Image (spheres, helix red, strand yellow):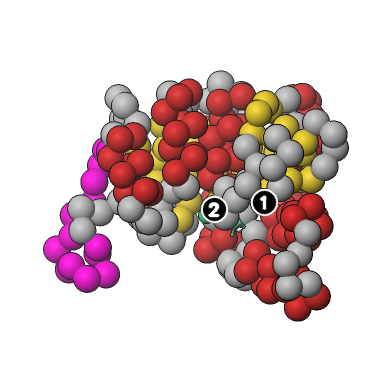
Amino acid sequence: MIVMKFGGAAVATAGSFHRIAAIIADARKEHQCPIVVVVSAMANATDQLLSLAKEVHPNPPRREQDMLISVGERISIALLAMALELKGVDAVSFTGSQSGIITDECHAEASIVEVKPWRILRALNEGKVVIVAGFQGVSRTGEITTLGRGGSDTSAVAIAAALKVSCVDFYKDVDGIYWSDPKKDGNAKKMEKMEYTEAKKLAEGGAKVLHLSSILLAEKNGVLLRIRSFYKPEEIGTVVGSGGA
Ligand code: ASP
Ligand code: MG
């Protein structure tokens, strides 16, 4: 089984859904195995929803804010399912709640407490590509929650851990992690492998490459994190994790 994660940069425009649908269709053809795809909201969608909330209320109630911003990922999953249908790939989109992502009650900063992936497994058994909305879950009392900014990385790792998949492929607008900033240093070298400890230091230092809690969860469950570019999907960039190959 493969778990793929596409961030906001990979779904910035309507056209990008066709691009990532092609990446998914190719992976399916090549590996002939079940595929779960986790997606973020389109580029600035979450920021736009947050500003909209602020236009209505200076300090929006966190429950209602979660209800609002969880919509960003919902837009992405539906559009991706449509793009896959057009390619003849049978796919189904699920919200965090439908995917069985159970969190605590802490609105805007919820933590995943359990994943009950029954619906995901059933759809995979039916031969469908399953598309999961990142960044969101549902509390035990049925409230929609979000995981904190950048949290869809954590959704992807939690899904992989629950399905016992040993690695998550993160498709980004960068093709890996570099020793120095490739935008400033023309000779910057890409790292092939990185330990969880180093990745945690990067995330703590504010690097946007992976969300800190996703690295912690990956380390706990021994899930490898592969950073690759959606511009060059055939290349594996940097593998984060012990024994990463
Ligand atoms: N859309 C959410 C955010 O912008 C979650 C994510 O992209 O990981 O923070
Ligand atoms: Mg992100």
Q: Are marks 2 and 1 in contact (CB under 8 Å)?
A: no
- Please state, as top left, top right, bottom left or bottom right, where the C terminus lies in the image: top left
Residue 108's mark? 1
In percent of width and height, residue 213 lies at: 49, 40
* Residue ID at (61%, 24%): 163
Frontmost of labels 2 and 1 is 1
**Residue at position x 49%, y 31% from top?**
217
Secondary structure beneath dot 2 equals loop
Q: Residue at x 74, y 39 (%)?
A: 105
| Distance Cα–Cα, label 2 vs label 1 | 11 Å
In the figure, is residue 228 to the left or right of 118?
left
Dot 2 corresponds to which residue?
Answer: 150
User: Magenta region: which residues?
Assistant: 181-194
Residue 182 highlighted magenta (yes or no): yes
Where disc 1 sits, the SS reads loop
Which label is found at residue 33? none
Q: Can residue 35 be seen by looking at this rendering? A: no
Q: Amino acid at mark 1?
A: Ala
Cβ of disc 2 within 8 Å of ligand 1? Answer: yes
Q: Is residue 172 above or below residue 14?
A: above
Residue 177 sits inside the magenta stretch: no
| Quarter placement of the N terminus | top right
Seen in the image, is 223 located left or right of residue 116?
left
Image coordinates of residue 39 in percent, x first then y, are: 62, 50
The residue lying at 67 percent from left, 51 percent from top is 108
